[in-house]
Amino acid sequence: MWYSELVEAYEKIEATTKRLEMTDYLVELFKNTPSELLDKVVYLTQGRLYPEFVGIELGLAEKLALRAVANAAGVPVKNVESEAKRVGDVGLAAEDILKKKRQATLFSGRLDVETVYGTLDKIARTTGEGSVDAKIKLLSGLLADANPKEAKYLMRTVTGRLRLGVADMTILDALAVAFASKEQRELVERAYNITSDLGYVAKLLAEEGLEGLKRCKITVGRPIRMMLAQRLTSAEETLEKLGGRAACEFKYDGERIQLHKKSDEILLFSRRLENITAQYPDVVDAARRCILAEDAIVEGECVAVDPDTGDFLPFQELMHRRRKYGIERAVKEFPASFFLFDALYDGEDLTQMPYPERRRRLEAIVREGNNFRLSEMITSDDVNEIERFFELAIESGCEGLMLKSIAEDSVYQAGARGWLWIKLKRSYQSKMAEPIDVVVVGTFMGKGRRAGTYGALLVAVYDDDRDVFPTVCKLGSGFSDKDLENLPKILEPYKIGHKHPRVESSIEADIWFTPAVVLEIIGDELTLSPVHTCAFGQIREGAGIAVRFPRFTGRFREDKAPEDATTVKEIVEMYQAQLKKIE
Ligand code: ATP
């Protein structure tokens, strides 16, 4: 398959803002792809080479990539650099330069997908001494055989900036249409939820059809997409929703981890399914000693603890573990405890069993240790008892409670945010009951003290029905001087020249961003707003919902993808809950 076929599809996808059209182009592309290449084409379309959990990432420094363009085109590096600066995109710069050059000379050679993938893979894997030159050489070779359009996408891909805006769910839609039918989408999604690997699912579906997907099983070492929780604000309502009796657990405020054990080998996956094993050698150690099953997949929350008092510390303290070197020291200085709350596999697939059975199986395979414990839990049908347990959780340094269904159908809903788990969090002093997570989609340049830097950010929530990001407020408060200094650096890679097609805004920002960076904010209350597009027209015609007096809480939610931000539905529920409180 020629790489130009891929590029043609990318051009069309980039030009549309409509999800349905995007899906059609993907269907066409997938159908035209030989099945043995389908996994690679899916990863490339996502701007990657492997699923996230494999941990091999593209992301060649722009400076190096530009040197490769200079080599391939035979022009001075500084010309390429100034062109890139002018157009603000390494892809466009490469395209322009090659266009000019290629008018003068003929070039031969056509790039096929396998060569492109293989070379990008080599670039991603080359490390150590001399790797910089080797990478540039590999990329120059590809660019020398590329036409200008291909060069544009090669450059964006190799620097980790492809961002066609194709969501995982859109790829699943397209796969279902291309190789099964819309009605079978659920099966396709289930396969994805238990393997977390779109390329693998695509290839399996194309080669073995639905029967192949049905045989798809959870595997130790391959993360399962995590089950998520809904939220409510009162214990009474929550209990009612769960059928009058529920498992109530402490809601620990740390990092969710899915732990895989295959004999002595332990792997840890984050909520975004990245392999974070290296960050928690203490959890790995404890798991080897405390999990009695030969093979297992369990989940829990890792919480930072004060080494002097044993008290829980805020979630941010775990950030000290996000480092490449000096982990041993960080483990000593910033110890953590792991609290287990679910078992997905113990030699047998447990995901389709009801929660009480999974918890029983979890208890059977865990021998508790100092920093490796089961979550605190009671089963109750009594609102008063639950409220007391909630207070106890808060007193112990937790965020509140997780209430979980114990009904016959309380399976582990991989990848879903259903009503089987409901979170109850502590109210804050302000009228807005709790903080929300928002995505940065734009910024306004600052004035006065903030001249020359960002004045306020334009932030959005996620509409999961329509796969778009409507705005919910401008955010200018709560930033420390250090935050203000860092923000432009953090957001720089996501700068784009126009509003992102998945962003809905009636305001013009000075700079637009691809939705990527998630922040936690708290506000005074939710109000109706003619300006912001969140839940537009849902409460009142011509108005959306906005956060009044929003402040950054100091938490960058690096563990969240933009699609994990607070949803429009949640905002509507919070708005309605707030009205009830005022009444
Ligand atoms: P979400 O994960 O729901 O998108 P979030 O990361 O902001 O949002 P919360 O909404 O506060 O987290 O609550 C859900 C998270 O609570 C889980 O993903 C998990 O990390 C954490 N958690 C803590 N204790 C428990 C528990 N006992 N059972 C399940 N989850 C728990």
Image (cartoon, rainbow, N blue to C red):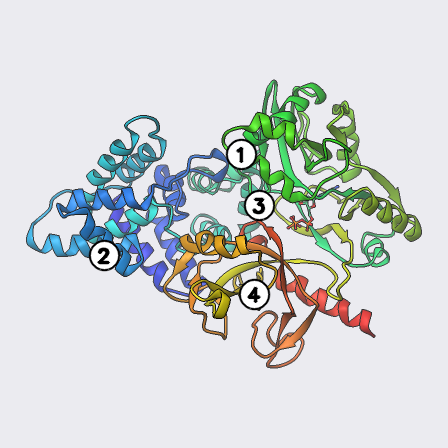
Q: Is residue 333 above or below residue 531?
A: above
Q: Earlier in the sequence, mark 3 or mark 4?
A: 4
Decide which of tag 4 and tag 1 comes sooner along the chain: 1
Asked if labels 2 and 4 touch by Cβ distance under 8 angstroms, the answer is no
Label 2: element kind: helix
Question: How far separated are the C-alphas under marks 1 and 2?
Answer: 37 Å
Q: Identify the residue shown where x is 31% and y is 46%.
A: 62
482 vs 30, nearest the viewer: 482
The crowding category of the residue bearing disc 4, from other C-alpha atoms within 10 Å (few below 14, some 14 to 19, many at least 20), is: some
Dots 3, 4 in contact, CB < 8 A: no
The kind of secondary structure element at disc 1 is loop
Look at 62% across and 71% down and name the residue there.
546
Residue beneath disc 4: 476
C-alpha separation, residue under disc 3 versus residue under disc 1? 12 Å
Residue 522: % across, % down: 67, 61
On the image, numbered disc 1 is attached to which residue?
275
Dot label at residue 428: none
Quadrant in which the N terminus appears:
top left
Calculate the distance from the C-alpha at mark 4 to the C-alpha at mark 1: 34 Å
